[in-house]
Amino acid sequence: MSRGRFSPWLQRLLLAGLAAGMVLAGGEIALRGVRFSAPVQPITIVGRDGKAKPDDDRGMIPDSELQFRFNPGAEWRGRRINALGFLGREAESNKAPGAVRVICMGDSCTAQGNPPYADFLHERLTNAPPTPQPWEAFNMAVHGYSSEQGLRLFRRQTRYLQPDYVTLYFGWNDLWRSRTTDRLKLARRSGPIWGRIQKLMNRSRLYQFIVSRSQARQTPDADNYVLRVPPEEYRQNLLALVTEIRAAGAVPILITAPRASTLTPLLAANRQVARIEDAYRLHDEYCEITREVAKETGAPLLDLARIFREESLDALFSDDGIHLVKDGRRRIAEEIYKLLVELNATRSRE
């Protein structure tokens, strides 16, 4: 009885599904036939030349909590990602007994370069440790990360690696424009299965067509954009990082992101800012927030923005005015090293 009653309904459902599938398949085939392509929502990283670059499909992978992350063991732009999932030297998860561990967190300004400044710092600390104990440093920064992602990364991984010092070099990605704030975007957590489904959908020409038509109806003016991490949320993230780093038994070191006297106009062309003047203004604002948080919490501050400005160190920047060339990364490592020596000298006098 039950079988006969539902059979026509099931037949209609199957026929409807088959018809819909044929329509979708036909659309997909037609779009591929005319070689339509409009990649949807790739992970984009701004390079040292100021141009947005898509992620390497194997080196940068979706993450349900962080949005994206490096893939341990894979290669990304000619560099091998270490076992911890970051660029730079290999580091053990377990700290050696008696060792002092410095972890460098941040965005591409910290992650970029071969070697990154964390490796220069490691070399300096190894050759001339500030105290009799053995010292080490390694990188836990990711291209494209904001302070919102940095906070989540610390909670998920960094705090379990027994840091003694954690440097925080964020700000640039926080002030870029986006359709949605990072906090809202990252609140929409999904599992790895959905991440794989989303990746497959992004490869569908039909899905690309639908999304591209939808985006084409949106007017790309300033009213449609927000900052990835608005100023107050940036302040909250830094305050949370300082609190949680201390709770983990480590010392937070806040760093203001330096810039050259001239930034690339591509920042406005890429719509990361509405006008290039906004990049200067917002950068100054976020640096000042970093200083205020350091003063409010008593956390050590390395004011690289002031140091690089006062010493006119434009030659240490790449063409975008944001990322550092090799000598610039070496200089950052030296400034961090000097601060660590100073902090430990102060401790020994107390």
Image (spheres, rainbow, N blue to C red):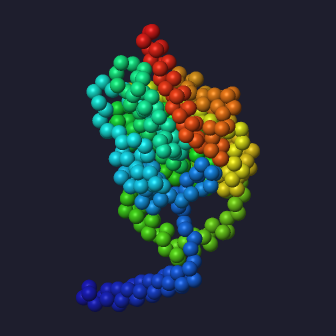
Q: Is residue 325 above or below residue 67?
A: above
Residue 247 seen anywhere in this rendered image of the structure: no
Determine the residue positioned at 65% across, 47% down: 320
Determine the residue positioned at 40% across, 64% down: 196
Determine the residue positioned at 67% across, 37% down: 314
Q: Which quadrant would residue 311 be assigned to in this image?
A: top right
Q: Quadrant of the C terminus?
A: top left
Return the residue nearer the eye: 326 or 243.
Answer: 326
Determine the residue positioned at 58% across, 52% down: 46
Return the residue nearer the eye: 224 or 46.
Answer: 46
Return the residue nearer the eye: 316 or 208.
Answer: 316
Q: Is residue 23 above or below residue 205?
A: below
Residue 101 seen anywhere in this rendered image of the structure: yes
Task: Residue 347: give x, y in percent of width and height.
Answer: 44, 14
Q: Is residue 1 above or below residue 163?
A: below
Q: Quadrant of the N terminus?
A: bottom left
Task: Residue 151: give x, y in percent of width and height.
Answer: 47, 40
Task: Residue 349: give x, y in percent of width and height.
Answer: 45, 9
Task: Residue 291: give x, y in percent of width and height.
Answer: 60, 28
Q: Which quadrant would residue 310 be assigned to in this image?
A: top right
Relative horizontal placement of residue 333, taking residue 136 as reference (left or right): right
Residue furthest top as drawn: 349
